[in-house]
Amino acid sequence: METLVWVVHIIVAIAVIALVLLQHGKGADMGAAFGSGSSGSLFGATGSANFLSRSTAILATLFFLTSLGLAYFGLQQHKPASVLDRTSVPAKPAEPAAPAPLPAGSGGSKAGDIPQ
């Protein structure tokens, strides 16, 4: 079932790309309004939706639904058993190495570390 959703998702994605590239933008009618074509209004008809725009809307909805389906399948494959499995607990850090022995005669003082 997941493979079918993947195939439909990819086909719909390619179809949405193709339909968007086939449509012309609203700015394309702007040049037609200034004498190079026969446009009825300055910005084109805004109230009507043609076949390409309705098909794009339907395919975009289908793309959204297949995306949700793939997210559902992805969640089902990686379902943690408990709340503790959902959190990542860092591993216990290694014990620090033993401090180096102090030089003889220093008496535990750090005065010898100060540069002169």
Image: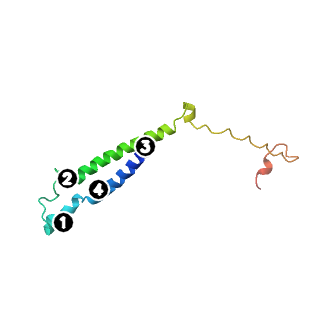
Instruction: Look at 15% across and 69% down and name the residue there.
Output: 36
User: Mark 2: which secondary structure?
Assistant: loop
Where residue 27 sits in the image (x, y, percent)?
Answer: 22, 60
Mark found first going from the N terminus, 1 or 2: 1
Q: CA distance from mark 3 to mark 1?
A: 43 Å
Mark found first going from the N terminus, 3 or 1: 1
* Dots 4, 2 in contact, CB < 8 A: no
Q: Nearer the viewer, mark 3 or mark 1?
A: 3
Amino acid marked by disc 1: Gly
Q: Which mark is residue 50?
A: 2
Residue that label 3 marks: 70
In the rendered image, the vertical position of residue 34 relative to residue 6, given as above or below: below
Mark found first going from the N terminus, 1 or 4: 4
Q: Quadrant of residue 33?
A: bottom left
In the rendered image, the vertical position of residue 62 relative to residue 28, given as above or below: above
Q: CA distance from mark 3 to mark 4?
A: 23 Å
Give the farthest residue toward the right: 104
Residues packed near mark 1 inside 10 Å, few (<14), some (14 to 19) or many (20 plus): some
Looking at the image, what colour scheme do you see? rainbow
Amino acid marked by disc 4: Leu
Amino acid marked by disc 3: Leu
Q: CA distance from mark 1 to mark 4?
A: 23 Å
Where residue 15 sits in the image (x, y, percent)?
Answer: 33, 54
Mark found first going from the N terminus, 2 or 3: 2
Instruction: Look at 17% across and 51% down and name the residue there.
Output: 48
Q: Is residue 74 left or right of residue 19?
A: right
Q: CA distance from mark 4 to mark 2?
A: 12 Å
User: Mark 3: which secondary structure?
Assistant: helix
Give the farthest residue toward the top: 82
Q: Which mark is residue 31?
A: 1
Q: Which mark is residue 19?
A: 4
* Dots 1, 4 in contact, CB < 8 A: no
